[in-house]
């Protein structure tokens, strides 16, 4: 599939928004609009998976293995860094239990012994629990003929949403996976289907969708309302739909820096909080102003993420996608 620069730019901006959100949060300030980056990520994820599955035939098992190779190794590494830091006392507020560590590594929602919230060891990893949930359900769709997949995904995601709406489950797993936010993946799938069939708006309506989405996010921020997924989800869908419409119409060109940041967005998302924690502590010791601290922390988090992309994610992906690695996995697989 050719690069969709609009999607890459959205990935870049979503990652940077989350970085600034956490940088502000660590200094006691608020940049709540940054949290909406997660909603954009989820819609993009649904869009990309649907387009890839349409363009490239794949088995359910192959799809899941590909997603695990893409997501898990870097996440496990950062989680290991967090665990090691907690053991040596770098993160005094981080409490560890074997059960919580195992749940974190397996993408199973579980209460954190540190706060009681349903968070993994690496807090931002909560979104990866949703991603893996989506991948498992999406793999189920690949067992079906193409014409039935959209109906299956609509029914299964709608079913989980209705369970949460009607029964309000208390278990961490069901409480997590029945939240309305799961519908953002489905929204991305529907946008992808519209894009594949070329049922896409022109430049004017595309710009209107992007403008309405950004105005909606800004309004929520300015009036101090909560960034609820029932509001942010539709706004994120409008943003993605508008961007792919503009791209289809030839209105989006390549911007190298944003394209690169889009490529590195996953590593930026995983690693940025480590740099932010160090920078905020150091800034407090030297009396740096809050604004300067946020800016420096955001830049530091982005730089660390980009470095991790080059030094960790890309080499890991190269090794895990090599024919030799795949051959060894097959050879060692029990018959």
Image (cartoon, rainbow, N blue to C red):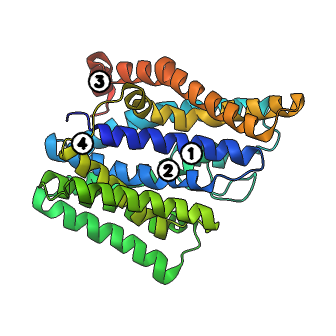
**Against 174, is 258 above or below?**
above
For this view, does 142 lie left or right of residue 132?
Answer: left
**Local secondary structure at mark 4:** loop
**Against 111, is 122 above or below?**
above
CA distance for labels 4 and 3: 40 Å
Q: Which residue is mark 1?
A: 18
Q: Nearer the viewer, mark 2 or mark 3?
A: 2
CA distance for labels 3 and 1: 34 Å
Q: Which residue is mark 4?
A: 251
Q: Which residue appears at 33% of the width and 42% of the height?
A: 7
For this view, does 253 lie left or right of residue 210?
Answer: left
Q: Nearer the viewer, mark 3 or mark 1?
A: 1
**Local secondary structure at mark 2:** helix
Q: Residue 206's image quarter? A: bottom left
Mark 2 neighbour class, 10 Å CA radius: few under 14, some 14 to 19, many 20 or more: many
Mark 3 neighbour class, 10 Å CA radius: few under 14, some 14 to 19, many 20 or more: few
CA distance for labels 2 and 3: 34 Å
Q: Position of residue 153 (x, y in %)?
A: 27, 63
CA distance for labels 4 and 2: 23 Å
**Local secondary structure at mark 1:** helix
Please give the label number shown on residue 37.
Answer: 2
Q: Is the Cβ of the residue at disc 4 closer than 8 Å to that at disc 1? A: no
Q: Position of residue 39 (x, y in %)?
A: 46, 56
Residue 305 in sight: yes
Please give the label number shown on residue 326.
Answer: 3
Q: Residue 227's image quarter? A: bottom right
Q: Position of residue 298 (x, y in %)?
A: 63, 35
Q: Is the Cβ of the residue at disc 1 closer than 8 Å to that at disc 2? A: yes
Q: Which residue appears at 35% of the width and 29% of the height?
A: 255
């Amino acid at each position: 599939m050719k690069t969709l620069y609009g999607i890459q730019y959205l990935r870049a901006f979503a990652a940077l928004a989350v970085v600034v959100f956490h940088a502000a949060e660590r200094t006691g300030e608020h940049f709540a609009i940054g949290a909406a980056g997660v909603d954009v990520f989820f819609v993009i994820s649904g869009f990309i998976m649907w387009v890839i599955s349409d363009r490239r035939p794949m088995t359910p098992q192959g799809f899941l293995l590909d997603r695990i190779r893409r997501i898990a190794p870097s996440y496990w590494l950062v989680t290991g860094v967090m665990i090691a830091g907690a053991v040596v006392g770098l993160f005094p507020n981080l409490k560890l239990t074997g059960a919580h560590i195992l749940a974190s590594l397996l993408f199973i929602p579980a209460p954190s012994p540190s706060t009681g919230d349903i968070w993994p060891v690496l807090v931002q990893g909560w979104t990866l629990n949703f991603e893996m949930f989506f991948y498992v359900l999406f793999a189920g769709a690949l067992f079906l003929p193409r014409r039935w997949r959209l109906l299956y995904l609509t029914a299964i995601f709608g079913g989980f949403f209705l369970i949460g709406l009607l029964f309000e489950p208390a278990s961490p797993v069901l409480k997590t996976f029945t939240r309305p936010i799961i519908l953002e993946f489905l929204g991305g799938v529907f946008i992808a289907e519209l894009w594949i069939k070329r049922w896409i708006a022109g430049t004017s309506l595309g710009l209107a969708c992007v403008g309405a989405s950004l105005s909606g996010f800004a309004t929520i921020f300015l009036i101090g309302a909560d960034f609820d997924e029932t509001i942010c989800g539709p706004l994120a869908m409008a943003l993605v739909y508008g961007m792919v419409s503009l791209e289809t119409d030839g209105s989006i060109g390549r911007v190298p820096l944003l394209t690169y940041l889009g490529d590195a967005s996953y590593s930026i998302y995983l690693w940025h909080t480590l740099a932010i924690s160090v920078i905020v502590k150091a800034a407090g010791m030297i009396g740096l102003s809050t604004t300067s601290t946020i800016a420096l922390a955001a830049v530091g988090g982005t730089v660390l993420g980009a470095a991790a992309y080059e030094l960790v994610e890309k080499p890991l992906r190269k090794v895990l996608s090599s024919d030799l690695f795949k051959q060894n996995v097959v050879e060692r697989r029990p018959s």
